[in-house]
Amino acid sequence: MSNQVSMLKSTANNPATKPELTDSLIASVNEKSAAVLALLQNASIELNSAGLKSITFANSFGAEDMVLTDIILKHQLAIEIFSLDTGRLPVETYDLIAETEKHYNTKLNVYFPKAETVEFYVKTNGINAFYESIELRKSCCHMRKVEPLQRALNGKSAWITGMRAAQATTRTSLPVREFDESNKLEKFNPLSDWTEQEVWAYINLHQVPYNALHDQFYPSIGCAPCTRAIAMGEDVRAGRWWWEDPMNKECGLHVKK
């Protein structure tokens, strides 16, 4: 682990990350995992061209994304994996990036925001201006996430996300496959119908690396200043941009035109 200051609390123990592995839960996870694998295999056949990896997976290193990472790399699917380094991620996320590369013996593509854009924003608005208004928060998300995502998706035929329909009110109608009008390509959400229990059951069954903050009641992890732990019973996205109305709580990566 890094020597930097950590967000971890040594006494915390989140039972959600260690669900009881009942026979019915294991059967459900196995069935859904097989469906995800078939979906991704068929997508690779349909959308990859001339041996090129035209499909890319946006890995934010949340629990759901680690499930998909495990499936893609274990089965050696012809799918590129990339991540967005906003410059303000928790140290635990950087630790997980390093652990993932070591665990799977792979190297991931990482995209960064444009330095000059970040410098101008900070000079003009302040280092933590995103707390001051929704407009400034969304501007920060755009320069740190949306613009790098657009570069990552350039020239691709499809992208994959780890979104689930149950994660937020903004995601209740989430198809497994849709056309992303904003980025002009196909978009797959293979875990759309997965429950949180199923995600964590897969992680425990397959010993998948995951962000240490999840054990500390951080079910959804983004940039460090915009992420907090939640209380038992709170919505899983309650710790993201907690000062805003739930209907506005998206960073812009998945907002439809």
Image (tube, grey):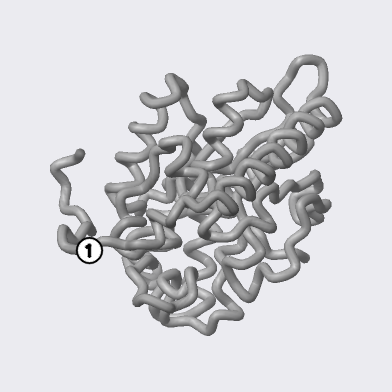
Label 1 is placed on what type of residue? Ala
Q: Secondary structure at mark 1?
A: loop
Residue at 82% over, 31% down: 47
On the image, the x and y values in percent for residue 111 come to: 50, 39
On the image, the x and y values in percent for residue 165 come to: 66, 64
For residue 120, say whether it is visible.
Answer: no
Residue at 43% over, 50% down: 86
Q: From the viewer's perspective, is residue 215 above or below residue 210?
A: below
Q: From the viewer's perspective, is residue 246 above or below residue 10?
A: below
Q: Which residue is mark 1?
A: 12
The image quadrant where one finds the C terminus is bottom right
Query: Closest to the observer: 58 or 184?
Result: 58
Residue at 69% over, 34% down: 37
Badge 1: residue crowd in 10 Å (few <14, some 14–19, many ≥20): few
Query: Closest to the observer: 71 or 160?
Result: 71
- Which residue of the protein is positioned furthest toward the front in this rendering? 23
- Which residue of the protein is positioned furthest toward the right in this rendering? 46
Q: Is residue 1 left or right of residue 227?
A: left
